[in-house]
Image: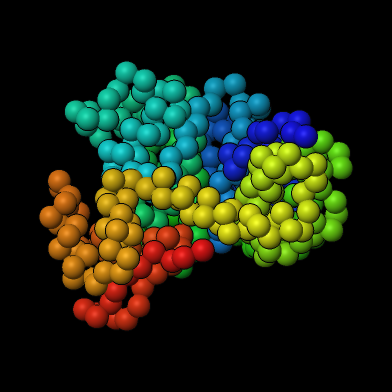
Amino acid sequence: MITDARALRPSYLPADLHHRDGKIDQLADALRPITDGDIGEDAFIFGPSGTGKTTLAKYVVRKLEQEALDLRWGYVNCMSGSSKNDVLHGLVRDAGLGADLRKEGTSTTKFLDRLREFDDQVVAILDEVDVLEDESTLHSLYDLPNLTLVLITIDEDDLFAHFDGRLRSRFMGSEMVRLERYRHEELCDILRARIKAGLAPGVIDERTVEYIADIAAGDARIGIAILRRATKRIMSEDESWITLDVVDSVRDEAREEIHQHHVDDLGTHKRLLYEIIEAAGEIGVTELHETYEQRAAEPKAKSTRRRYLTSLESKYNLIASNGNGKGKSYTVPDF
């Protein structure tokens, strides 16, 4: 039934990206100078969840890797660690430049020196860049003469509203890649490609593919998760086909799986805020901050916490809020 399980995984990088040709070219052109040994043009990728922002960035950089002899690149999800030390450590490790450097006890200067001293070009892909705690992280990376930034987030206006004037000025001329939700037929094509790569012929019919795309409503991540859960379901029940009823039976599980994946990616302080809300069922904002301050070893500033909570709610749908000011309360939404 399954011919290649990798094709059903969220981390799978396909051989071809469907319906993103123009965006691939746009990002590739910004990074093209790297193939000549020069620094590329810094780039931003904006768009709603499930539009393939991370996949696009990795796809283009891996293609670039085939053309450039001397290139290292690293990927960091800032939701997993948003301090300057977290990001720099993750970057040098993922780029293969810092296997000997521990996060604890190594200064940010040491990480930056390691990147600067590399003889060739480095591309840094920073995902969920809106949750960075310290803008000096971007200033320091921008100043490296051999490093090109690819910065990913959902909301363009929100990101630039939080940048200081110097950052806004520095990034004013950067390449802006903006992704829209997939149209119905585009998402069907993406699902068909995953099915062709990962499942035996006849496991799912066209009507069911269309139905999954309807449910996903332009979000490729949800569509692929439904396909993956449906495949697991028929295998566990010794069935041969993914039917409409099977899809209906797993659609909530698929959304919960994505939710849990986001939770698993959270760094220490974001995870603590989430767990306090989840354990309480519903908790007022004052009690939330008090509980956090009691439990956190080194509590973040309230302004930083508020930014975390905003991201957890409005960008990643991990929590929900009701009310305003001191009357505000938080919950974890049901599926």
How has the structure been colored for display? rainbow
Which residue, as the protein is rendered here, is positioned at the far left?
A: 294
Residue at position x 85%, y 51% in the image: 205
Residue 331 at x, y percent in the picture: 35, 68
Residue at position x 32%, y 50% in the image: 271
Which residue, as the protein is rendered here, is positioned at the far top?
A: 100
Residue 300 at x, y percent in the picture: 20, 54
Residue 81 at x, y percent in the picture: 33, 44
The image shows residue 179, relative to residue 37, as above or below, that is below
- Seen from the viewer's position, the closer of residues 23 and 280 is 280
Is 58 on the left or on the right of 19, as rendered? left
On the image, which quarter does residue 16 sit in?
A: top right
- Seen from the viewer's position, the closer of residues 253 and 213 is 253
Residue at position x 50%, y 27% in the image: 72
- Seen from the viewer's position, the closer of residues 186 and 111 is 186
The quarter of the image holding the N terminus is top right
Residue at position x 30%, y 30% in the image: 111
Is 184 on the left or on the right of 277, as rendered? right
On the image, which quarter does residue 215 sit in?
A: bottom right
Judge whether residue 93 can be spotted in this image: yes
- Seen from the viewer's position, the closer of residues 101 and 239 is 239
Is 95 on the left or on the right of 181, as rendered? left
Q: How many marks?
A: 0
Judge whether residue 175 can be spotted in this image: no
The image shows residue 265, relative to residue 302, as above or below, that is above
